[in-house]
Amino acid sequence: MKILMISNHLGVQSGVQRYVQNLLLNLDTDRYQIDLFVGQCPPDQTSTAPALEAHGVHIIAVPDHKKDRIRALAAHLRTHRDYDIIHYHTASKIGAPVCGMMRLLCPRAKIVVHSHIVYPPLTLTWRAAHLVYQLFADYFLGCGVAAGRFVFGCHIDEKPNFSVACNAVDQERFRPDAAARAATRRAYGIADTDRLAGFVGRLNHQKNPLFLMEVFAAMAAQDVRWKLMLVGTGEKEPEMRAAAEAHGLTDRVIFAGVQSDVPAFMNAFDLFLLPSNFEGSPVTLVEAQGCGVPCLASTNVPDDGSVTALVHFLPLAAPLSDWASKADAIAPGGDHADHWQTLAAAGYELKTAARRMEQLYDKLGGQP
């Protein structure tokens, strides 16, 4: 069976791309011939390409610019019309006409569209996109029900051709690891008596990092043992550095940059902070739970990925003192407990999720 998977870019910092990488590395590339059509890796990130190519995935990397990618995709499909499945990861309105283009250029393929975002408000143009998606796609996936409803329509989850493909992670990598915790903390000068809050992701508007810095300032005012580690980069980093300086916290905020060994950093945290303005169903929230880390997120983060008792929510409008008090209450510190029995039962174990995706491909492709 020949499959074309379409994603955003090859960088490790994108939650969608990490999901795509996780999925592809666990698909049977002896049974499925997989082409990954994707933007080139941003210069500030490590590429997922070497691991994927070693697993047998053929990568078609094009300029990492939305319009250029669409033009390149059209050119590719004009000369490659023999795909059985097109699996399109989308988080935008423009994906709807792209779906129509794929149907026109590759009429025999079954088109699977896969939503990864909830980004209110639900405008008239989004409602028009719902109709276009439903006109041209064969099957709909969401990282959660909320993400499916937002991108494909409010009642999409009532249709037989919709299902949730949760952002499963690798249990062998994202698990409690006391040795990795100790080593990472030691490397950054984090004492056993320190309390370390952490964040992993892009420092951009979606993740609300300036509010995160305000939350941390309130936490630090309540308890001088708190430090903050930020794993990732983004356009808001200069403003965050300025905010840390304005609060007198430069010696307590660590900008660790983009890191490939995310599990080691997750294990180092006593608390994972995710006060996002909007999300689909963030991979990082599952990764943190896999490592046994208490999580404090905004209520703008859908609760699909809140699988264990580790996850707690507060509205962005709540007083900063409430955020600080909640952080203090849920993050006792010390080595983390294992919650994989609960995560696996909810479908968040990667190999199980990959087998379910293969079953979907076989069903759509008419395989026995």
Image (cartoon, helix red, strand yellow):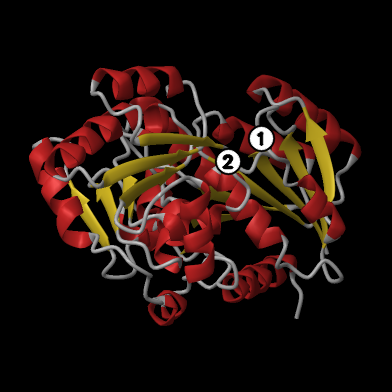
Q: Nearer the viewer, residue 103 or 233?
A: 233
Local secondary structure at mark 2:
loop
**Viewport quadrant of the C terminus:** bottom right
Would residue 358 be visible to someone looking at this image?
A: yes
Would residue 162 be visible to someone looking at this image?
A: no
Place residue 105 in its image quadrant: top right
Q: Nearer the viewer, residue 282 or 366?
A: 282
Measuring 53% from the left and 73% from the top, which residue is drawn there?
Answer: 349
What's the amino acid at mark 2? Gln
* Label placed on residue 13: 2
| Classed neighbour count for the residue bearing mark 2: other residues with Cα under 10 Å, few (<14), some (14–19), many (≥20) | many
What x and y, as percent, mark residue 253?
A: 37, 34
| Classed neighbour count for the residue bearing mark 1: other residues with Cα under 10 Å, few (<14), some (14–19), many (≥20) | some
Give the labeled residue for mark 1.
Answer: 45
Measuring 41% from the left and 41% from the top, which residue is drawn there?
Answer: 229
What's the amino acid at mark 1? Gln
What x and y, as percent, mark residue 255?
A: 46, 33
